[in-house]
Amino acid sequence: MSGAMDFKAFKSIYFLGIGGIGMSALARYFNSMDIPVAGYDRTETRLTRALVDEGINVHYDDVIGEIPATFKNDNSREQTLVIYTPAMPESSAELGFFKDGGYQVVKRAEVLGMIASEGACIAVAGTHGKTTVTSMIAHIMKSADVSSNTFLGGISANYGTNHIQHGDGKLVIAEADEYDRSFLFLNPNTAVITSVDADHLDIYEDVLSMIETYIDFTNNVIDGGIVLLSESVLKIIGERVNPHAVLMTYSIEGATDYVATGINILEGSYAFDVRTPNGVLKAVTLAMGGRHNIENAVAAIAVADNHGVPHEEIKNALDLYAGVKRRFEVVHNSGPVIYIDDYAHHPNEISSALSSIKELYPDKKLTVLFQPHLYTRTRDFAEDFGKSLSIADSLLLLDIYPAREEPIEGITSELIFDHVQSGDKLLCNKKNAIEMIDFDKTDVLLTLGAGDIDQLVEPITEHIKSLN
C-alpha cells in the first residue's frame, strides 16, 4: 500500500511525460490545488496545448536548461516533487538530472495510489472498457452530487477533461492501469475488472502471469470491500479472487447479480432494462453505439447502486452520458458518410467495435482505417488482428505506431495485412490515407488505434463535410 504524502508541503511539482493521458490528469489535479506545475513531453499535442491554456508550463525538448529555474535551484530540491511515467527512457537528460540531484522522484502510479489512500477508492481495471466504465461512474456520481475526484485515461465528452472534481473529492474514482503493474499501488474499496484478455506481453511473461497480477489486484481490495467482475472475467478468475471481499458480477443477458435484458437497438444507440439485487431499472437509454457499452453501463450501474445512488438518479445520469473522446465516438453523422472514431488497439476490442457497427448499421458498407500500436503487440497478435479486421468491407492499414518501442526486425503492418481475409485491403501511410479512402463506396468510416491516428480525425471530418 502506498503511504500517505502531504502534497501541500511541496512548492512545485514537475512531470516527465506530462502529455500522457494519466500524467495530465494528475497535473490538472495538482494545478487545481494551486501548486505550481510544469513538465516535459516529447510531442506537442492538443492535450498539452490545453494544459498550457490552463496555466501549466510545458516544453518539448529533453534539455535541463528548459526546466524552469524555480524547479531546479538548490533551495527547491526538497520542495519539488518529480513525477514520471514508466514510458520515459532511462537515457532522459531531465530524468537523470532529477535522480542524480537528490530530488524525490516517483512514478505516476505511486502518486495516484497515495492520493487514493486518503479516502475511499473505486478502481476500474481491465484490458478494455475501463475508461468508459470509469467515466460513466464519475458522471453518475457527479450528477447525484456525490463528492468525488476522478482520474481518467481519456477525455470525458461531458466535461472536456480527464480529471473530474466534484466537492471535496475524498472518494477517488480511478482508472486502474495494468501496464507495468501500476494498479497494484491502489487499495480500493471497490474494484471492477472488465476483461482479462491477453495484452502487454512485453511486460508480462505470458497471459497466465498477467492474470495472476489481476488476482493480486483483487487482493488489494480492503476487507469487506467489493470485487465486481464481468461474466467473462468471473469464468477465468472467479474462484481465486480476494476471499475477504464481497464478489459481485455483471453481464448482458447472463446469470449475474447485475444484468442487462430486453435490449432494443435504435440507430446509433440502445434502450434496455437492468436487473439488480435491489430491483429493476426500466428503460435505461444509452446514446452511444457498441453492444460492449451496454455491459460497461451495467458495471457503472452496479458500482453506483452499491454506493447508495438511487436508481432514478442513475437512470437520469446515463440518459445524459455523452461518452469518452475516441471511445466509439460518432464524429460526424449528418451525411454522406457516418464517421466513427475509436481507440481500439487490441483484436478483441476491434472485433467488438466492428461487430457493433454491423449491428447498428446492418445495410451500410464499412470502411476501416487502422493504425497498429506497438511492434510487440503486432508480433504477438498479428493473426488475431487479421481475423478481427476481416469483418470490415474495406480496410486501409497504416504503419505501426511505435510509442515507447524500438523497431523489431521483420515486424511491420504487413504481418497483419497478410492475415486479413477481405479482398478490399490496402496499405497506406498518414500522408496518403485520406486520398486512398473510397468515400463513394463507404457508408460508415471507422478510424481505429491508440497512436497518433487521432491527428487525422479533423482533416477526415472536414473532407466528409466537403462531400455534401
Image (tube, rainbow, N blue to C red):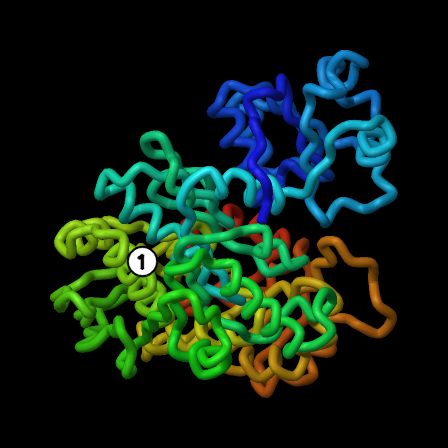
Q: How many marks?
A: 1
Residue 440's quadrant in the figure? Answer: bottom left
Question: Horizontal and vertical percent for residue 404?
Answer: 75, 54
- Check the image and report above or below for 136 versus 63: below
Q: Residue at x 73, y 39 (%)?
A: 42
Identify the residue under disc 1.
303
202 or 42: nearer the viewer: 202
Residue 290 appears in the rendering: no
Q: Residue at x 33, y 34 (%)?
A: 166
In the image, taking residue 292 as reference, residue 450 lies left or right, namely right
Q: Amino acid at mark 1?
A: Val
Q: Residue at x 38, y 54 (%)?
A: 332
Question: Horizontal and vertical percent for residue 200?
Answer: 66, 67
Question: Horizontal and vertical percent for residue 287?
Answer: 26, 58
Q: Residue at x 65, y 66 (%)?
A: 372
Q: Secondary structure at mark 1?
A: helix
212 or 420: nearer the viewer: 212
394 or 227: nearer the viewer: 227
Residue 64 appears in the rendering: yes
